[in-house]
Amino acid sequence: MPRIALIGADGQLGTDLQSALACEVVALMHKDIEVTDANNVAEVLSTSGCEIVINTSAYNQVDKAEDDPDAANAVNAEGPPNLAAYCESHSLTLLHVSTDYVFGTDESHDEPYRETDTPGPVSTYGESKLAGEQAVLNGCQRHFVVRTCGLYGHAGRNPGRGNFVETMLRLGAERDELAVVHDQLCTPTSTHDLAAAIAALIETDAYGLYHATNAGETTWFEFAGEIFRQTGCDIALRSITSEEFGAKAKRPRYSVLNCDKLAGVIGRPMQHWRDALAAYLETRNV
């Protein structure tokens, strides 16, 4: 079995990958490796004895990136080329996780994006992630670039970890009414399901760019409603527009991803987002 260096091992996806990968994993956190430093990348990876590198690290504070683009670009745009260069020079496989936020400029688009569709980000975060994925696509022959969306996992239970499900449950317990955006179509994705798909993908040599989310599509308003329905939380939900919400960074109005390519390679589609949510809630306190 190959040995895998997992960067960002303490994140939501990284945590589930440690369980999903059926091989020896070298778990690397920010204190262990600095992806923005090419020399540090070489030093750490050279002693890891790995054959595959999985990079889940990212600057994902979408709104803060608008005010601090240097921080976002350092991790998202400048880090991946360092990993790609090292993996290419040592004939290693690199799997890099990207985002649906590489899309958004075409506001007339209304069908799931394929890997062949032209990206066009509408935020600093999206631009930085696009630069990073392009560096991997162009800089390492044995690459997997996996775009995904709206991740939530059990490692994101604490506030500030970017877990929409936990945020809704916390706010639902504190308030009588919530206003949630209803004009952004996407597919929230369980890190448990994504980790399983990535584990299956790296067992192949079908290198390339992939879209990987749970199936179906929804809005954040509809997702919140399903969270409260499944948990029996009685709360009033009010739909608002992105403009009313007033986030610093613009989000794609439509960023549903077509995952047929992934399903064909690993032999199965990912489950529907409603079923993924039910599985997450069922195991939430286990």
Image (cartoon, helix red, strand yellow):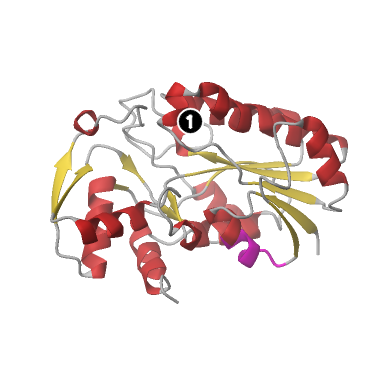
Instruction: Locate residue 126 relative to residue 29 in the image: left or right.
Output: left
Whether residue 119 is visible here, answered yes or no, is: no
Residue 2: x and y, percent? 80, 59
Give x and y (percent) for residue 89: 86, 35
Q: Residue furthest bottom?
A: 286
Identity of the residue drawn at 36% across and 51% down? 164
- In percent of width and height, residue 189 lies at 43, 53
- Horizontal and vertical percent position of residue 202: 69, 54
Quarter of the image with the C terminus is bottom left
* Residue at figure coordinates x 50%, y 49% from the top left: 260
Q: Is residue 98 above or below residue 1?
A: above
Q: Nearer the viewer, residue 29 or 284?
A: 29
Q: Quadrant location of residue 234?
A: bottom left
Give the magenta-colored segment's residue range: 16-22
The answer to which image quadrant residue 257 occupies is top left
- Indicate the quadrant containing the N terminus: top left, top right, bottom left or bottom right: bottom right
Question: In the picture shown, does residue 137 fall above or below 151?
Answer: above
* Magenta region includes residue 21: yes
Query: Label 1 belongs to which residue?
Result: 102
Q: How many marks?
A: 1
Residue 80 magenta-drawn? no
Task: Look at 32% across and 34% down and name the residue there.
Answer: 110
Residue sitting at 39 percent across and 50 percent down? 188
Characterize the magenta stretch by its predominant secondary structure: helix
| Nearer to me, 80 or 157 | 157
For residue 271, side relative to residue 89 (left or right): left
Question: Would residue 179 be found to the left or right of residue 206 on screen?
Answer: left
The amino acid beneath tag 1 is Val
SS state under label 1: helix
Against 53, is 183 above or below? above
Residue 154 at least partly seen? yes
Q: Residues within 10 Å of mark 1 (few under 14, many from 20)?
A: many
